Amino acid sequence: MKKKEIKCVIWDLDNTLWNGILSEDKEVKLREDAKNMIIVLDSRGILNSISSKNNYDDAMKKLEEFGLSQYFLYPEINWNPKSDSVGKIVKHLNIGMDTILFIDDSEFERNEVTSVYPEVMTDDGADLVKLLSNEILNPEYTTIDARNRRQMYLESIKRNCVEESFIGTNEEFLKSIDMRFCIRQAREDDLNRVQELTVRTHQLNSTGVTYSFEELDEYRKSGDHKLYVCELIDKFGSYGKIGIALVELGKEWHLKLLLMSCRVMNRGVGTVLLSYIMGEAKKNNSILLADFMQTDRNKVMYVSYKFANFKERSNDGKGNIVFENDLSIIPKIPTYLTLITEC
């Protein structure tokens, strides 16, 4: 098994989550080690979902009987190929395919999924106790945001339902949900989440550099740096801490790291933190430099810099770029949200 942090475990049901085949025996028996694993994963901030060939109503009724239905996000219970189901779940969750663990007792089904998505990790579920202790399912620490991750996704589902029925423009909808974007300098109790974001965020990540708790704490205390953290809140609840920025101060401000969770990409807030930092640098009569490491996954961040009027100062031809911005043009903060800097 690859050494990659898992963000979601997708479960088969028959002879995996429970013993027996539901369509043949309505009295299937829940595996207690499976129930325990689901609850523990949830407490660690690892999501759970389902890909099962079953009748949807019967399966959900049985999960409710077992007291587990609330733990599964975007369950795919149908007769389609399981690779189709896995693809839909990953699209809904907006996470990387290489952060999925698929548990199914059937070798055929595991192979069918990996034939389409070779980056998905699989397991037959024979020894769930041992699997639960695997490092890929054991984050170094569990933040408040992690413990609330499932709840935040449930709030997102409610948001999406309201959005689908909303009559009006996208901007009118965003204004209607009372979005507040909070930016402040990081405190010590933010650092575990900040560290987690550097590890888990790849698409809207300027460099991909990860930092230890101790390194982040040094930057937080340093008079030569600013470590910003931001949170997005609306009338449905909090999205949690969704972005960070590390700035080295001086005659030229130098943005060493900028990242934003992909969960908020469709909320039109991807460049708010960048615009704020540009404004702060201009107040200090500085220009702004920004490090960027080009990868296959952070093209959106590259485009964000270019649209914000950043120019390349240097490029080593290996993907390492230093951008420069004279701050003559600073993108405006969207009118559909409220910016809060004391939160």
Image (cartoon, rainbow, N blue to C red):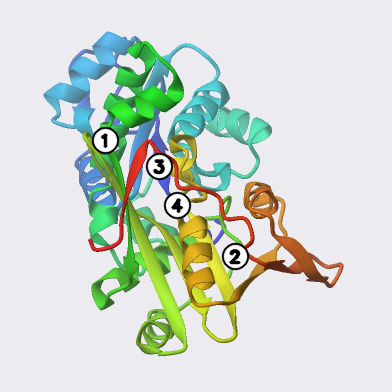
Mark on residue 9? 3
**Residues at marks 1 and 3 touching, judged by CB atoms closer than 8 Å:** no
- Residue in view at x 83 percent, y 68 percent: 318
Q: How far across and down, in percent of the image, does residue 218 sit?
A: 40, 88
Few, some or many residues within 10 Å of mark 4 (<14, 14–19, 20+): many
**Residues at marks 3 and 2 touching, judged by CB atoms closer than 8 Å:** no
- Residue in view at x 44 percent, y 84 percent: 215
Corner quadrant of residue 152: top left
- Foreground: disc 1 or disc 3: 1
Q: How far across and down, in percent of the image, does residue 192 sit?
A: 33, 70
Residue highlighted by disc 4: 6
Element at label 4: loop
Q: In which quadrant is the N terminus drawn? A: bottom right
Q: Earlier in the sequence, mark 1 or mark 3?
A: 3
Q: Earlier in the sequence, mark 2 or mark 1?
A: 1
State whether residue 70 is above or below residue 255: above
Going by the picture, which residue comes out furthest to the right? 317
